[in-house]
Image (tube, rainbow, N blue to C red):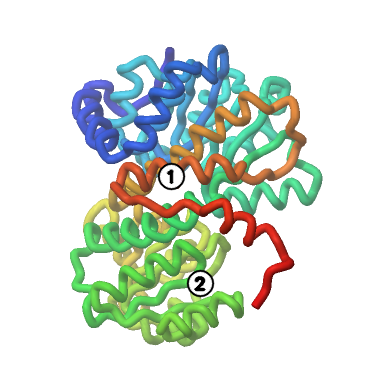
Amino acid sequence: MSYKVKDIKLAAQGSLRIQWAENEMPVLKIIKEEFKKAQPFENVNIAACLHVTKETAVLMKVLQAGGARVSLCGSNPLSTQDDVAAALAKEGMDVFAIKGVSNKEYYECLNKALDIKPNITIDDGADLISLIHNERREVLKTVWGGQEETTTGVIRLKAMAKDGALKYPVVAVNDTPTKHMFDNYYGTGQSTIDAILRATNILLAGKKVAVAGYGYCGSGAALRARGLGAHVIVTEVDPVRALKAVMDGFYVATMQEAAKLGDVFITATGDKDVITKKHMALMKDRAILCNTGHFNVEINVDDLKKMAKARKSFNENVEEYVLPSGRRIYLLSEGRLVNLAAAEGHPSSVMDMSFADQALTAAFIAKNYKKLSPGVLNVPEEIDVKVAKLKLQSMGAKIDILTPEQKKYLSSWQEGT
């Protein structure tokens, strides 16, 4: 066992937070008991590059209960919860994560996580997979398969697969319904607004909030902002998503137009340079910028730094940039993933489903890796169905069951009007 954490003395507090998350994650609790009996990861090494939060800790303990040796590193320099990392290290897990690490230290942690020569990789942003393919190719000899849990990572992996660069099978957990329809929509929506309020304590009611991107993450943030009384503007490049936003009752505009109107800007596209100097030059005094996409490329922070004649930090998550005109722009969490940098990320209850998908997908890989080919794969439908059923059960919800006659009708074509 080895670790690199901020302070091992934080372990007691971290353990309490993990216990709190466990109480909100009943599906993972059931899977943990199944894994204890079945031991699907006996003699299996798993390297995970994830946001090191109390919810992630619950997943790691579930994998351990199934027999795995787990090595965990952070997937974002600002998303690690130091007390949680300390608690896992204290319990004997290999953990390499400290909040606020430099870019160099970040990759040192990733390399440490790979030193166990994993059979399975779990990624949030595909940094681990990218590192293996670019610098740690010896790890390809031991890896059976991997999994990716965020939109940005899946985009990178599909690009790798298209170029023929992806050398092992990776399951796109992000793309499965019980992940993106709930985690991305409800989780990102709530946690993004939570982060903005924690960092600034502004009143959203009456504000103009511009949301860039109307996928599951952006539409969730738009919904929650409107729920707090904000006037929401949506920017998009996809005509179908833009049309959906219009029919959901939002004002749809270009970023060039939104830049003149917005009080708060939220980027959620997965692409770079969504907000650049040409937009910042049009923004009103005291505009607030934040990003809820995985990488800190959506807001061009270099442009902002070059434009500013002065900078001042109000707290660890709010920095003021004063432009030559005297107008001020506030950047939250360095343009990094705001919901994890300025808040605690998604609520445990919604991560219960996402991490149940992760746990069951890892077991699927361990059992079936010899049958899988390199590329980006879908989560098996039976995993989705199981997770949904267990979540409904934990919430006390019941659903109907098709009768034999109904099943026959749905599978036939002869019967009509």
- 67 sits left or right of 29 in the view: right
**Secondary structure under the numbered disc 2 in the rendered image:** loop
Q: Amino acid at mark 2?
A: Thr
Residue holding disc 1: 389
- Image quadrant assignment for residue 241: bottom right
* Residue 80 visible within the image: yes
**Secondary structure under the numbered disc 1 in the rendered image:** helix
Residue holding disc 2: 276
| Label 1 with label 2: CB-CB less than 8 Å | no
Q: Is residue 262 above or below residue 224?
A: below
Residue 167 point in image, percent of width and height: 75, 35
Please give the name of the residue rendered at 50% of the width and 18% of the height, measured from the top-left corner.
Answer: 38
Residue at mark 1 to residue at mark 2: CA–CA distance: 44 Å
Please give the name of the residue rendered at 45% of the width and 16% of the height, measured from the top-left corner.
Answer: 37
Please give the name of the residue rendered at 67% of the width and 25% of the height, measured from the top-left corner.
Answer: 143
Task: Work out which residue is located at the far right of the displayed protein and give it.
Answer: 164
